[in-house]
Amino acid sequence: MLKGRHLIDPMDLTVEELESVFELADKIIENPGEYTEVCKGKLLSTCFYEPSTRTRLSFEAAMLRLGGQVLGFSSAENSSAAKGESVRDTMMTIASYADICAMRHPKEGAPKVAALNSTIPVINGGDGGHQHPTQTLADLLTIRALRGKLTDFTIGICGDLKFGRTVHSLIKALSRYENIKFVLISPEELKIPDYIREEILIKKGMGFQEIERLEDVMSELDILYMTRVQKERFFNEADYVRLKDSYILDKDKMSMAKQDMAVLHPLPRVNEISVEIDSDPRAAYFKQAKYGMFVRMALIMKLLGVEKC
Ligand code: CP
């Protein structure tokens, strides 16, 4: 039963609960017209202290498509955070206006603080370089749709693995499925944090390797998950400039890949996937963004405990 729960970390949902969300998303995709009023009278608040296109707008589109309404703010400057209000006080206020809240914050743990002070479900829409569980829902729904299952594949995860919250959440979530092998591709400075390597990959006995060159493993991958080197996470501009173009996926590299390899990316992209790849049938990242809206529709319904009449 997901009604009334928060989603802060991907491990907040069991594999069975995840599957129930995906099954509902499948039904919504198949018959969207049957869900246009299920959230009538419900309000979603989007509290975004950090920029977003996909997460905020897909949450808002999701609620509107379910017949609910939305209110919120899209930057800290447009809220009383600019006057020094705490996340706790903001959340205690929002909880008396809305039925459910999606929050993004640059500080790790802020949505957790909100959840601890909330009487309505709080969904983490990304907290600093920590976690991004609903991006993981979109990623898993995409992989499940493309491959028919969430087991038995080799996934290359490439780019900023240190600050990449989508990467941390995806590895955590996938660690519960059978026969997943990870190839972690990054410069030395952007390697996966120790807590993911030790607490998840090693402790759970996952197959994984850490390498620097994408070319060395292209032919082995069933899925390639590209990520952006995130300017906003660097303290030093010179480090960002040195690392930002570490990986660029282009036609030459794609020619080394399996014919059915899928390319995923949480987006936004900067230079790491050449635009020429967008027309390659293996490019799945815009489809992934669309699945993100459908899976958020399913999640909102589950957390609010609403059902199709
Ligand atoms: N994938 C993702 O979180 O995108 P936005 O930053 O645009 O929300």
Image: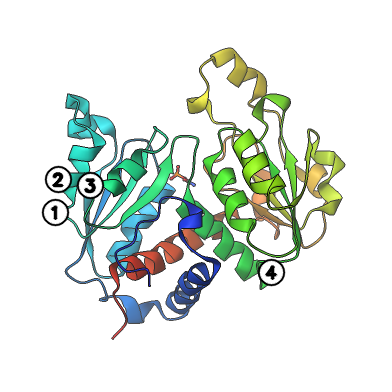
Above or below residue 196? Residue 281 is: below
Q: Earlier in the sequence, mark 4 or mark 3?
A: 3
* Callout 4 crowding tier (Cα within 10 Å): few <14, some 14–19, many ≥20: some
Tags 2 and 1 in contact by the CB under 8 Å rule? yes
Compute the Cα span from label 2 to label 1: 7 Å
* Callout 1 crowding tier (Cα within 10 Å): few <14, some 14–19, many ≥20: some
Depth check, mark 3 against mark 1: the one in front is: 1
Write down the quadrant of residue 161 in the picture.
top right
Q: What residue is shown with label 2?
A: 93
Residue 299 seen in render: yes
Q: Amino acid at mark 3?
A: Gly
Quarter of the N terminus within the rendering: bottom left
Secondary structure at numbered mark 4: helix
Residue 284 seen in render: no
Q: What residue is shown with label 1?
A: 97
Q: What residue do we see at 33% from left, 66% from top?
A: 303
Residue 72 circle label: 3
Q: What residue do we see at 52% from left, 72% from top?
A: 16
Secondary structure at numbered mark 1: loop
Q: Amino acid at mark 4?
A: Arg
Where is residue 172 drawn, in percent x and y?
59, 51
Q: What residue is shown with label 4?
A: 147
Q: Amino acid at mark 1?
A: Tyr
Secondary structure at numbered mark 2: helix
